């Protein structure tokens, strides 16, 4: 546990622009605490002690604001930045060196048993407020932009934004890290609102001509 805490802390120091010390990362980063509590809950879950596992998970949520189901599988060096409001479902699988911002949900779309939650491959980045839903694969080094709703698989190295999430039309090397938003990229939501406004204006003009 101590070795893992140091490994995550060093990873945080490398990836967080605030450049916290290792001690700060261990003492002050709720995302690190949430991962360590999850390790305990997951071990209990795998050993068949599901009630105690849920209790540990619930206590960890109270302390950190991060809710991770004890059945979820998490790789090494997961960095949950800020942490508050993150929800990770039972059958979610997270690879190594993944970055998740606050307000993210790795959720399901069905109440049927089986694989219901996303799989995040190594190096994936999920932006603040993003909703990644269903048993889909987010590829290696792929990025889901802030507040996106992603219900389709994302290939390796691709960034998706908007509702529903889709690529913004820029090459991966032109995309920012962090929240997975490309500078100057079109906003799919704004495009839809603009189309609705144009349609409303056309309808008003048609009504005024008939009046």
Image (cartoon, rainbow, N blue to C red):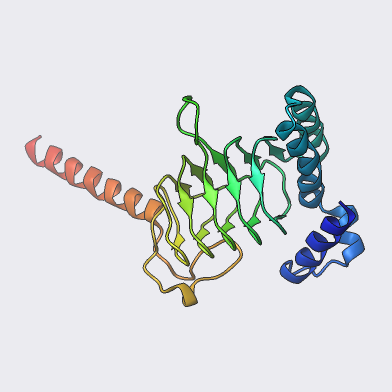
| Residue 155, x across and y down, in percent | 42, 61
- Pick the residue in front: 191 or 160: 160
**Which residue sits at x=65%, y=53%?**
101
- For residue 199, side relative to residue 27 (left or right): left
| Residue 170, x across and y down, in percent | 40, 72
In the image, is residue 134 above or below residue 138?
above
Judged from this view, the residue extending furthest toward the front is: 47
| Residue 47, x across and y down, in percent | 75, 32
Judged from this view, the residue extending furthest toward the left is: 210
Quarter of the image containing the C terminus? top left
**Which residue sits at x=84%, y=56%?**
5
In the image, is residue 15 above or below residue 106?
below
- Pick the residue in front: 56 or 201: 56
Q: Quadrant of residue 8?
A: bottom right
In the image, is residue 186 above or below residue 110?
below
**Which residue sits at x=16%, y=44%?**
205
- Pick the residue in front: 99 or 139: 139
| Residue 168, x across and y down, in percent | 39, 64
Judged from this view, the residue extending furthest toward the bottom is: 173
């Amino acid at each position: 546990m101590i070795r893992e805490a140091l490994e995550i802390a060093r990873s945080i120091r490398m990836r967080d622009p605030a450049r916290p010390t290792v001690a700060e990362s261990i003492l002050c980063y709720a995302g690190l605490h949430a991962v360590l509590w999850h390790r305990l809950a997951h071990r209990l879950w795998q050993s068949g002690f599901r009630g105690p596992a849920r209790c540990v998970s619930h206590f960890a949520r109270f302390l950190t604001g991060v809710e991770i189901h004890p059945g979820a599988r998490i790789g090494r060096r997961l960095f949950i930045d800020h942490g508050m409001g993150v929800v990770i479902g039972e059958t979610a699988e997270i690879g190594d060196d993944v970055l998740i911002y606050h307000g993210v949900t790795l959720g399901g779309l069905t109440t049927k048993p089986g694989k219901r939650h996303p799989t995040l491959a190594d190096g994936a980045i999920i932006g603040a407020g993003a909703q990644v839903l269903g048993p889909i694969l987010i590829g290696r080094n792929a990025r889901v932009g802030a507040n996106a709703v992603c219900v389709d698989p994302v290939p390796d190295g691709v960034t998706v934004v908007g509702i529903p999430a889709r690529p913004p039309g820029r090459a991966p090397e032109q995309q920012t890290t962090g929240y997975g938003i490309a500078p100057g990229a079109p906003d799919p939501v704004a495009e839809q609102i603009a189309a609705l406004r144009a349609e409303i204006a056309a309808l008003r003009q048609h009504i005024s001509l008939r009046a």
